[in-house]
């Protein structure tokens, strides 16, 4: 049904009066017609305000509303508020057609959508043309369909802009800067030509400290030489007693040479650093070798199967997920073998490589874990009324509780329970060895692969949340401030936190990092170092 707005002369005016004063009657009709057009135009202004906001949002790369059409309904009363009762009547009529048209929007011809105006000026020009062509009748349905077409076109632009922005940000987070490639090659070259770069790390006289329980032991599992340099330097600088600090850096074979070369040429005395590649572990226990190989083979099998799925959209999504460095990083998954890495240690502080240590770690080292294996931020912490608050994400953020294997009561997991992360944690290796946590972790890796990766998005943390469930002790939130790769934290929170964790895509060694946080991270590197200056990691001073 078409809805028209018409204008007519008052019925009470007599023919004799019309005959005597034709000019007056014409003036009244023209005034009525102008008033109708004015009311129509002003009735649309509420919607046009939205158009303008959406256009600005497109330029900014985001939308003010979930969709361009989603914000208009609540503006229905704006015409009456601005223009009085006449405006309210017109707006109500417009909104009636609008709500009906929304159900037909998906049926619009794509050609019509593409032909819709691109700007506010273009829309106003078409409105003027329509008003002039209809004379004293305005087809409200035609107006609604034109506005619908423009909104759909704008929606597509906004969504396209969002996708491009997310994709570009994703690519920026994946890249390894040329300066880091340069540093790795320079250090490998130095290892080949310089005996100093090949000197033992640590020196032989310091080797007894590596297994001495009287020292504070920190473990770092990484293949990133620059991140390792900052994490170690910040831990030593923040330590109240650096001579008591022993840092164990575990890496893979390809990264061993540059990382060894860096710490051989940049000692952090009086602290001690050990650099050890996976190829250097001399495990004599066949059971240990079999366990480590089981994890390696499962990660490799998962990496192959992850790309084999039905549906091009799912496949493309998985390709993007798999391109993240952390998704199938073998070193991330091998953290589950800490007891095998350090068979002679009873306790160790585990750090991710994308951290900066700001406070002395002795308090964390001395944390009482009771019968638990791990002490970490993010577990349940009681508050005044007996309730609990989650410092980080919940289990439901990591695990898919719509899958029966995850939500089964026998597993005892609840989506609302708090999750923890590896960022910084204190680990009781002796308590770990008395459990089957490692085997449970491996079992769930297999289950996720066999389920078609429906139990969780591929990553190393979700199976750990299941394997360590009930064995995690909550520690003071000040020990760990995560998310610095996602957002800028509160200044006070930044100041009082012991360990800053750059979890998220904006790693501090990337150009997309937050400038203030990047400068804080770079502050733990020696700006006059020839390797860093030569590769452009730091600016020449």
Image: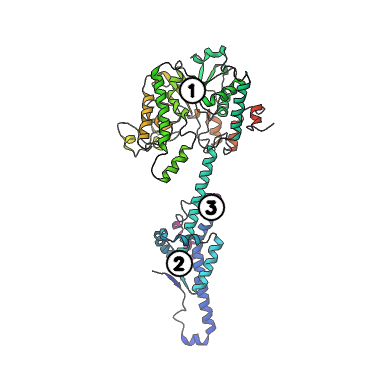
Label 3: how many Cα within 10 Å (few below 14, some 14–19, many 20+): many
Question: Up-down: is 358 above or below 87?
Answer: above
Tell me the distance, in whole angstroms, between the alpha carbons under discs 3 and 2: 26 Å
**Could you tell which of marks 2 and 1 lies nearer the N-terminus?**
2
Can you give x and y, in whole percent of width and height, for residue 430 in the image?
41, 18
Label 2 residue SS? helix
Give the magenta part as a residue range.
Answer: 58-87
Residue 234 forms part of the magenta stretch? no
Front-most of 9 and 100? 100
Badge 3 is on which residue? 58
Label 2: how many Cα within 10 Å (few below 14, some 14–19, many 20+): some
Can you give x and y, in whole percent of width and height, for residue 326 in the image?
48, 33
Q: Which mark is residue 278?
A: 1
**Quarter location, residue 268:** top right
- Residues at badges 3 and 2 in contact (C-beta under 8 Å)? no
Q: Which mark is residue 515?
A: none
Label 1 residue SS? helix
**Quarter location, residue 300:** top left
């Amino acid at each position: 049904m078409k809805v028209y707005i018409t204008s007519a002369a008052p019925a009470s005016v007599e023919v004799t009066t019309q005959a005597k004063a034709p000019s007056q009657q014409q003036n009244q009709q023209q005034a009525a017609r102008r008033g109708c057009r004015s009311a129509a135009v002003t009735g649309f202004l509420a919607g046009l305000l939205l158009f303008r906001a959406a256009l600005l949002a497109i330029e900014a790369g985001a939308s003010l509303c979930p969709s361009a059409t989603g914000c208009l309904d609540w503006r229905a009363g704006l015409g009456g508020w601005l223009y009085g009762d006449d405006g309210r009547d017109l707006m109500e009529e417009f909104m009636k057609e609008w709500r009906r048209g929304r159900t037909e929007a998906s049926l619009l011809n794509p050609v019509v959508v593409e032909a819709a105006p691109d700007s506010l000026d273009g829309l106003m020009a078409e409105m003027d043309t329509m008003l002039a062509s209809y004379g004293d009748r305005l087809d409200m349905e035609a107006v609604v369909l034109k506005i619908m077409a423009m909104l759909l076109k704008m929606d597509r632009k906004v969504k396209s802009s969002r996708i491009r922005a997310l994709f570009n940000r994703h690519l920026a987070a994946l890249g390894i800067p040329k300066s880091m490639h340069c540093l790795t090659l320079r250090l490998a070259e130095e290892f080949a030509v310089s005996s100093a770069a090949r000197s033992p790390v640590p020196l032989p006289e310091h080797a007894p400290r590596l297994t001495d329980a009287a020292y504070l032991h920190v473990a770092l599992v990484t293949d990133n030489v620059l991140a390792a340099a900052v994490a170690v330097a910040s831990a030593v600088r923040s330590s109240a007693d650096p001579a008591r600090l022993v840092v164990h850096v575990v890496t893979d074979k390809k990264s061993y040479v540059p990382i060894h070369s860096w710490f051989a040429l940049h000692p952090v005395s009086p602290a001690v650093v050990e650099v050890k590649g996976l190829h250097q572990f001399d495990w004599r226990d066949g059971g240990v070798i079999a366990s480590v190989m089981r994890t390696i083979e499962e990660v490799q099998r998962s990496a192959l199967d992850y790309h084999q799925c039905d549906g091009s959209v799912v496949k493309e999504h998985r390709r993007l997920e798999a391109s993240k460095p952390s998704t199938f990083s073998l070193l991330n998954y091998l953290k589950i073998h800490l007891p095998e890495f350090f068979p002679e240690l009873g306790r160790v502080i585990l750090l991710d490589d994308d951290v900066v240590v700001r406070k002395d770690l002795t308090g964390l080292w001395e944390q009482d874990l009771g019968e638990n294996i791990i002490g970490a931020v993010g577990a349940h912490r009681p508050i005044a009324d007996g309730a609990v608050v989650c410092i980080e994400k919940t289990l439901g953020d990591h695990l898919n509780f719509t899958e029966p294997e995850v939500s089964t009561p026998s597993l005892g997991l609840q989506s609302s329970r708090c999750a923890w992360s590896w960022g910084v944690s204190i680990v009781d290796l002796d308590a770990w060895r008395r459990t089957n946590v490692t085997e449970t972790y491996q079992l769930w890796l297999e289950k996720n692969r066999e389920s078609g990766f429906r139990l969780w998005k591929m990553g190393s943390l979700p199976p750990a949340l299941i394997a360590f469930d009930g064995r995690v002790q909550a520690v003071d939130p000040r020990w760990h401030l995560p998310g610095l790769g996602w957002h800028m934290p509160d200044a006070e929170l930044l100041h009082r936190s012991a360990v800053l964790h750059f979890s998220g895509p904006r790693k501090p060694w990337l150009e997309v990092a937050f400038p203030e946080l990047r400068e804080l991270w770079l502050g733990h590197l020696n700006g006059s170092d020839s390797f860093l200056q030569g590769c452009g990691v730091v600016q020449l001073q």
